[in-house]
């Protein structure tokens, strides 16, 4: 394939892959869900559907309008797709919608057990018992993340207790202090609502 042929195909790649890919990535960001399998195929299908909507819109506007150009359609497809991604992400976080899914299909829409247990509207207090330690940490759940394939958890307002339940350290001078550790370094964790 020559450079000229690649340049000629570039608008088609831009049109039929990029809008769907951007919409998928935006949805992943909003919903905290990971979409790994068949990303290219899903991107092409979403792009095609969005371009169909753009063509319907393009029929309603004059022919010299920007929505009838390749780049205008790509921009319009990304904007429409971002709008639908926001709506879908909001629906996935909506408790009544989750209740419908649980009652109809017996399936929760939560990504995993940790999300279901810890990401409540009021938050959760957790007691972390680290492996190979003679203490435990009490605090409020502050979030979690995946870095290099390892899940990490953070708690704010950490208070350290020895195994007998005596508090021996608290960050009274620093209200922004957090305790961060890998989930693999935790022997077990208690959730206190």
Image (cartoon, helix red, strand yellow):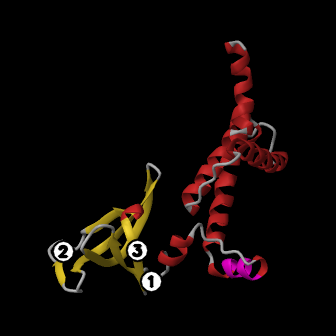
Please give the range of residues in magenta. 97-103
- Label 3 vs label 2, nearer the camera: 3
Q: CA distance from mark 3 to mark 1?
A: 22 Å
Asked if 48 appears above or below 141 in the picture, the reply is above
Secondary-structure class at tag 2 = loop
- Viewer can see residue 54: yes
Residue 91 as seen in the image, left or right of residue 115:
right
For the residue pair 183 and 79, the one nearer the viewer reads as 183
Q: Which residue is mark 3?
A: 188
Residue 122, label in figure = 1
Query: Which of the 4 image quarters holds residue 32?
Result: bottom right
Residue 24 rendering spot, x and y as whole percentages = 64, 51
Residue 104 rendering spot, x and y as whole percentages = 78, 79
Q: Are marks 3 and 2 in contact (CB under 8 Å)?
A: no
Q: Which residue is mark 2?
A: 171
Residue 163 rendering spot, x and y as whole percentages = 25, 81
Secondary-structure class at tag 3 = strand
For the residue pair 95 and 144, the one nearer the viewer reads as 144
Residue 98 as seen in the image, left or right of residue 50:
left
**Which residue ends up furthest to the front in the rendered image?**
132
Q: Residue at x 58, y 62 (%)?
A: 31
Dominant secondary structure (helix, strand or loop) of the stretch shown in magenta: helix
């Amino acid at each position: 394939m020559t450079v000229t042929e690649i340049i000629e195909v570039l608008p088609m790649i831009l049109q039929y892959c990029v809008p769907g890919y951007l919409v998928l990535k935006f949805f992943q960001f909003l919903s905290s869900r990971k979409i790994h399998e068949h990303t290219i195929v899903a991107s092409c299908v979403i792009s095609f559907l969005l371009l169909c909507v753009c063509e319907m819109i393009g029929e309603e506007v004059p022919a010299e309008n920007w929505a009838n150009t390749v780049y205008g359609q790509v921009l319009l497809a990304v904007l429409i797709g971002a709008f639908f991604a926001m709506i879908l992400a909001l629906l996935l976080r909506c408790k009544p919608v989750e209740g419908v899914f649980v009652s109809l299909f017996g399936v929760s829409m939560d990504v995993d057990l940790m999300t279901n247990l810890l990401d409540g509207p009021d938050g959760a207090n957790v007691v972390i018992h680290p492996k190979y330690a003679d203490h435990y940490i009490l605090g409020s759940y502050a979030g979690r993340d995946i870095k290099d394939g390892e899940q990490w958890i953070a708690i704010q307002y950490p208070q350290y207790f020895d195994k007998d339940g005596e508090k021996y350290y608290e960050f009274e001078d620093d209200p922004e202090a957090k305790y961060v550790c890998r989930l693999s370094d935790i022997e077990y964790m208690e959730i206190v609502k």
